[in-house]
Image (cartoon, rainbow, N blue to C red):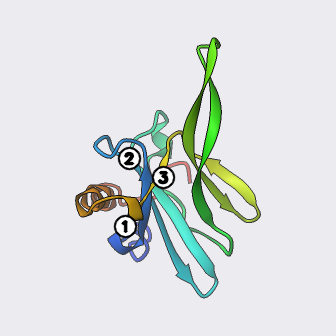
Amino acid sequence: MGYRDDFFIVDNIIGYTGKLNKMPTVYFSWETFDGIEFARITQTYPDPKNVGRGAVRTSRDYKIYNVQVEKKVLGLFTKTVTQGLEYYDGHVQHMSRNEFISKDEFAEHDLALCAQSIKKFTEIKPKY
C-alpha cells in the first residue's frame, strides 16, 4: 500500500508540467468538505529527495494556472516563457519550471501516460 492511495487516482489528475513523454510532474486535486486537497507526483528532478508523491495538502483557495515570465538567457537577452503557478493559502506557493497543461487540454492517451506515475511512484518524497 502506498502513501495516500485514496487520493493518487486517475480521476484526481488535473494536469501536468514538463514533457509528456519524459516523465512529467503530474498534478492531482479533489474537493472535500474541508476544502481542496492537492498534491503532485514528481517523476524526475535533479535532487532525488524531491522525486515521488508530494505531501497532500488542503486549502480553500487552491488554484493552478499559467503566467508569462521574462527569463534571461545566458545573461544576453530575455525571452517570454509560460510557467505553471500554484496559489493557495492566500499566496503564490510554487512556480513550475514549465507550462501547466490542464486535463481539459489533453487526450485520453495523455491521461494514460500521466496515470503511469501513480504506479511508478507509490511512496512520499524522501524530503518529507
Choose between 35 and 110: the one closer to the eye.
110
Q: Which residue is mark 2?
A: 24
Dot 3 or dot 2: first in sequence order is 2
**How far from the left and from the top, in percent, is residue 124?**
46, 58
**Residue 47: which disc?**
none
Residue sticking out furthest to the bottom: 33
Q: Few, some or many C-alpha atoms within 10 Å of disc 3 (few <14, some 14-19, many ≥20)?
A: some
Q: Which residue is mark 1?
A: 2
> Residue at left 63%, top 67%?
62
Choose between 39 and 97: the one closer to the eye.
97
Q: Are marks 2 and 1 in contact (CB under 8 Å)?
A: no
**How far from the left and from the top, in percent, is residue 113?**
26, 55
Mark 3 is on which residue type?
Lys
Mark 2 is on which residue type?
Pro
**As displayed, is residue 61 above or below residue 50?**
below
When asked about the image quadrant of residue 71, the answer is top right
Position of residue 93 in the picture relative to residue 22 (left or right): right
